[in-house]
Image: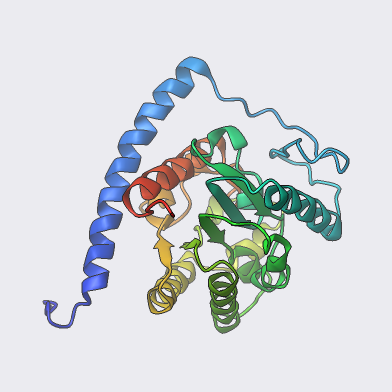
Amino acid sequence: MSTSFKTFPIWAFFSLLTNGILMLAVILLIWQQQRLSAFFGIVTSPEAISPNNSSEIATPDLGRRHQLTYQQWVDILMQEAKVAADQRSPHLSILVGDSLSLWFPPELLPEGKNWLNQGISGETSNGLLKRLEIFDRTQPEVIFVMIGINDLIRGVSDRVILDNQRQIINYLRKTHPTAQIVVQSILPHGAEEATWKGREKLLAVANSRIRELNQQLQNICHKKGVKYLDLHPLFTNKQGNLRREFTSDGLHLSPEGYIVWRSALQIYGEIELKPQR
């Protein structure tokens, strides 16, 4: 069945074109970075979080959960956001989300920007919505949002997830009118190959449902006038599951997975995100 160009939204056409260019560029950049990584090596040793030293960065330690409570995490993020606001950090980009954002290795984040990581392990869309005010005083150029997988694991309905996403977008647009808001797609999981300790709950969430949810999320972003970065195809194998080489347990990302994400952020920034005056 053919699709009429008259009924095919022009924004969707350019979205497909941009994603195609992005995927090709990411593949080339990943190849280049993997060669460099093999030569120089990538530091992935875990470092513990110290509540008394916000300059230390937590990186994933497989099989071990961090010992901080949710409120302790919020307090740490509040302190770091205050520092960024007081110092009026130039070219500020903010990562907002759950453990996938939290564990993003600082050395892999795109260069030329100041990064503020506001991720919390186990975060939900409702929890994120309630703590967005933490970085109200910052003046970011870009805010990258990724949230939703923990909602699905906890049995939250698509309707509630999407409603929370709308409220998050509305809040960020109102509070940071000069910032570019980039909502990132929810990533798939490893399905039967997953070894994460919550495997049964994870398998109850079909990856097909995640794809459908992402499509609705993309439509919301278009209507709200914010950016949508579709990372999903970059992490998906032929079966529609999270690629084995990009994950540590079927849910969280491996260093190779973060290289893919970093490459996507870097290329997307050069193609889609214009510097703010």
- Residue 9: give x, y in percent of width and height: 22, 77
* Residue 120 visible to the viewer: yes
* Residue 239 visible to the viewer: no
Q: Say left or right for 239 vs 153.
A: left
| Residue pictured at 19% horizontal, 77% vertical | 8
Is residue 149 shown above or below 51?
below
**Of 150 and 243, which appears nearest the observer?**
150
Q: Say left or right for 234 vs 137.
A: left
**Of 242 and 99, which appears nearest the observer?**
99
- Residue 208: give x, y in percent of width and height: 44, 68
| Residue pictured at 46% horizontal, 46% vertical | 243
| Residue pictured at 62% horizontal, 45% vertical | 89
Q: Quadrant of residue 127?
A: bottom right
| Quadrant holding the C terminus | bottom left
- Of all residues, the one furthest to the front in this rendering is 277
Q: Say left or right for 64 vs 183.
A: right
Is residue 80 shown above or below 199?
above
**Of 201 and 46, which appears nearest the observer?**
46
Q: Quadrant of residue 226?
A: bottom left
- Of all residues, the one furthest to the top in this rendering is 39
Q: Quadrant of residue 202?
A: bottom right
**Of 29 and 208, which appears nearest the observer?**
29
- Residue 260: give x, y in percent of width and height: 44, 41
